[in-house]
Image: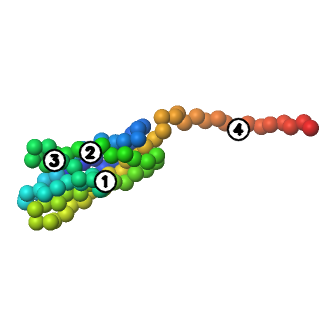
Amino acid sequence: MIQTVEAATTKGKTVRIAGVARDDVKLARVGVAGRRVDMVGGTGRFFAVVPIALGRNRGAVTAMDASSNKAERFVLVTWKRDIPEIEFGTYHAEVIA
């Protein structure tokens, strides 16, 4: 079982994904976005700082136990620019030649 956020929004180029992985058999490894990450002191807790692209990003968190059973959970991260949404309204131009 993997516990982590399902979705997050950030204004930066990276996001920190943290969570916990548990299993009734010993966990062998945990990965975030295709990268192996270390678990904190054998507790199953983990975190990773992952680079993201502008817009929506979908990354997988995977855990594998000693028997090669695999669990996977997807996290949706949205990178929004730090530019405010501005409503400009309707403009007209008059051209005289």
Instruction: Say which element carries label 3.
Output: loop
Which circle's residue, 3 or 4, is located before the other in the chain?
A: 3
CB-based contact (under 8 Å), mark 2 and mark 1: yes
Foreground of the two, 53 or 6: 53
Q: Which mark is residue 90?
A: 4
> Is the N terminus in the top left, top right, bottom left or bottom right quadrant?
bottom left
Q: Which quarter of the rendered picture does the C terminus lie within?
A: top right
**Secondary structure category for the residue under label 2:** strand
Q: Amino acid at mark 2?
A: Ala
Q: Residue pushed farthest right?
A: 97
Crowding at dot 2, Cα within 10 Å, few <14 / some 14-19 / many 20+, comes out as: some
Q: How is the image coloured?
A: rainbow
Q: Of the two numbered discs 3 and 2 on the same chain, state the one appearing first in sequence.
A: 3
Foreground pick, 71 / 52 = 52
Q: Is residue 26 left or right of residue 47?
A: left
| For marks 3 and 1 on the same chain, the one whose residue lies earlier in the sequence | 1
Q: Which residue is mark 3?
A: 39
The residues tagged by marks 3 and 1 sit, at their Cα atoms, a distance apart of: 15 Å
User: Which label sits in the foreground, 4 or 2?
Assistant: 2
- Secondary element under disc 1, as helix, strand or loop, is loop
Point out residue 37 in the picture as x, y percentages from the top left corner. Answer: 22, 49
Instruction: Give the amino acid at mark 1.
Output: Ala
